[in-house]
Amino acid sequence: QVQLVESGGGLVQPGGSLRLSCAASGSLISNYVMGWYRQAPREQRELVATITSGRSTNYADSVKGRFTISRDNAKNTVYLQMNSLQPEDTAVYYCNAVYYGVSRQYDYWGQGTQVTVSS
């Protein structure tokens, strides 16, 4: 079992920056694929970025060049640095951890943190 707790959300003006953190407990995440997803009102949850245990990253086209995902396995924490934020980035941001076992996939989610971009 992995528990994920997001933090760092808030209200920011367009063009501003925020850094989200996802602290994991219950298990070491070094072998997990970690990701950030977001869900805007009346929209489906969508992928923002993922990072593998080998630190390979993948980003949604809408955030490439503005967001950076990173992980600190020693702190059991994943980060999402968000720069040049725009109103369309407003959403609840969720942390995700996936472990690919021999016969099944283990999938865990945090409770989410609100990011609001508005002047």
Image (spheres, rainbow, N blue to C red):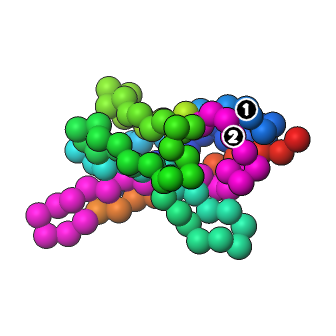
Is residue 90 rendered to the left or right of residue 75? right
- Residue 111 occupies quadrant: bottom right
Q: Residue furthest right?
A: 119
Query: What residue do we see at 53% from left, 63% from top?
Result: 46
Q: Which mark is residue 81?
A: none
Query: What residue do we see at 48% from left, 53% from top?
Result: 60
Label 1, label 2: how many angstroms apart (C-alpha)?
A: 5 Å
Q: Which mark is residue 85?
A: 2
Labelled pair 1, 2 in contact (Cβ < 8 Å): yes
* 86 drawn magenta: yes
Is residue 105 rendered to the left or right of residue 51? left
- Residue closest to the eye, 102 or 65: 65
**Residue 66, percent across and down?**
57, 37
Q: Which mark is residue 16?
A: 1
User: Which range is magenta?
Assistant: 82-105
**Residue 27, percent across and down?**
30, 44
